[in-house]
Structure formats: structure tokens, C-alpha cells
Amino acid sequence: MLQTRLEELDRRFRETLPVFAFHVVSAVFPLFSDMLLGTEDEEFRLCLERLMVLERRLFEELKPVLEERAASYGVDPGSVVRVHAAVIDYDLWVISSVLEVGFDGFLRRLSERAGMEAEEFVGYLYSLICVTMCIDSVLLKGAPHRRDTFEALIGWGSSYAEEVEDYLDTLSLLVSDEAYEALAGFAEG
């Protein structure tokens, strides 16, 4: 995708995204399903809490590397960091939500309270993850690319990151019982 001509990028991205999403789901669900299903076990809960700490720490260590590499490629370091921060925020949100209400409760609340929002969110999330992987291929591995395509992907990533963050705010309100009940009470009058 990184060597796709700019005028073909949108079409190529839309064609590639479903296959990419399938691969992400195929890899992530088996890897984390036992962990997320085991949130009733205190040991699993501690593992999830440690994972959150580790992700925050790794992001703080990765951030200066991303900024330096982005600057060396002549692209906006702030946009690159924002893209990565949104992916980390998603991970932290899922883990904290599952810790708060359990995996079954999390899925039930999403489907009952935010089915349409969650469905729309997933499209932006997979787009963000795909773009992040493209950006990382260039910045961290020196993958061959077209400069105009690379810059466009960073711009798309910034837009996807903003959408993901906005959806996370909304979904957080709908998953948390306290916030949901307050919103329901406010809507009633």
C-alpha cells in the first residue's frame, strides 16, 4: 500500500481493509480471549492491570523514537504520536472496561446500549490500526514508500485517531453503569 500512487490509494485501502481486519481479528481474539474471559479470577485481573501499566510505559518510551523518526522523514511528529496514542487509548479503554464490568458485561452493554455506535467505531478502529502499521513500517523499518502516499496515510491516521477518541468518549459513557444511568436520567427529564 505504501507504494500505491496517491490517486489509487483510497480504492486500494478500501479493498485491503476487510482482509486486514480479518487478520487482526484472527490473531487478537485467540490471543486475548482467555485473558478477557478470566476477569473473575484475581490473578487475571492483576495481569490486565499490569498490562495497562506496561502499555503506558512502552508508549512513553516509544514516543520520543516516533517523534525523532517522524522528524527525520520530514513529517509531523505530533500527528504520528496522536495516531499511536489513539491505539493505546483503545487498548486501555477495553481493559479498564472489562475490569470494571467483566467481559460478558462489557459485550452486553455494548450490544444493548451502543450497538450502532460500536459498529461504526470498529470501522474507524481497523482503519486506524492499518494506517498505524503502515506508518510504523516506514518509520521503524524503513519500508519503501511514496512520500505523497505516506503523508496522506499520516493525515488519514490523524482523522481516524480523532474519530476513535470521540467514539471512545461516547462508548465509555454507555458502558459505565453510573454514567449511563445519569445520561438516562437526564434524557428523561
Image: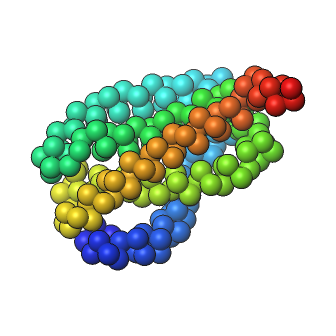
- Which residue is rendered at x = 78% and y = 42% of the image? 113
Residue 119 in percent (x, y) is at 66, 55
Work out whether 20 lies above or below 118.
Answer: below
- Which residue is rendered at x = 72% and y = 25% of the image? 179
- Which residue is rendered at x = 23% and y = 44% of the image? 76
From this viewpoint, is residue 152 visible?
Answer: yes
- Residue 38 as seen in the image, left or right of residue 128: right
Q: Nearer the viewer, residue 108 or 155?
A: 155
Residue 96 in percent (x, y) is at 60, 29
Q: Nearer the viewer, residue 62 or 42?
A: 62
Residue 125 in percent (x, y) is at 52, 51
Which residue in the rendered view is the most extreme toward the front? 189
Image quarter in which the N terminus is found = bottom left
Work out whether 73 lies above or below 20.
Answer: above
Q: Nearer the viewer, residue 139 or 6?
A: 6
Residue 30 in percent (x, y) is at 59, 53
- Which residue is rendered at x = 15% and y = 49% of the image? 74
Work out whether 31 lies above or below 185.
Answer: below
From this viewpoint, is residue 29 visible?
Answer: no
